[in-house]
Image: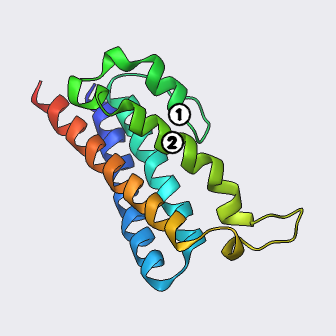
Amino acid sequence: MKHLARVAASYLRQADDRLDDARRALRRGNYPYALRLSQECVELSLKAALRLVGIEYPKVHDVSDVLLENSGRFPDFFRDNLEFLADASRRLSSKRDISFYGGEEALLPPEELVSRKDAEEAVEMADKTLTLCKRLMGELAKT
C-alpha cells in the first residue's frame, strides 16, 4: 500500500504542476493549451485516486467508467462527487485531440475551436478534481 501511495503522490504532484501551467496558459490567452493541460491534470488526479484504492486503471485517457464501477471503494465525500469527476474525465478527454490538433479534416486550428469559456471551465474542473483527489489521499493516509 505504501508503494501505491508513493505513486499516487507523484501523480498528484504532476497534476498540480499541470494545473499551474493551465492557469498561466489561460491568462496568456492560449485556450487550447489550458484545456489540454487541464485534461492531463484530471487524468493524473483520477488515476492517482484509483491507485490509492488499489484499482488498476486502463491505459486510456478517460477513466470515468472505472471510477463509477468501483464507487464502493471510495469514502462518502468522494463518492458524493463521482458524477462530477466522471463527467470531467469524459468531457475533457473528448476535447483532448481538438485542443492539440484542432479540426484536422476541416483544416481548423485549435485556437478556432477552443474558446476562453471552454478553457475556463476546464481549469475549474481540473482544480476541483485535484482538490478532491488530494483530500482523498489525506483521508486514506489517516486510516
**10 Å crowding of disc 1: few (<14), some (14-19), many (20+):** many
Is the Cβ of the residue at disc 1 closer than 8 Å to that at disc 2? Answer: yes
> Measured along the vertical axis of the image, is residue 38 above or below residue 142?
below
Tag nearer the camera, 1 or 2: 2
Is residue 56 shown to the viewer in this render?
Answer: no
Instruction: Tell which of 51 and 117 is nearer to you.
Output: 117
Spot occupied by residue 64 in the image (x, y as percentages of width and height): 51, 32
**Residue at 34% from the left image edge and 56% from the top image edge:** 127
On the picture, is 62 further left or further right than 103? left
Residue type indicated by callout 2: Ser
Quadrant of image for the C terminus: top left
Q: How many marks?
A: 2
Residue type indicated by callout 1: Val
Task: Give residue 89's mark.
Answer: 2
On the picture, is 68 further left or further right than 30? left
Instruction: Tell which of 78 and 37 is nearer to you.
Output: 78
**Residue at 58% from the left image edge and 71% from the top image edge:** 115
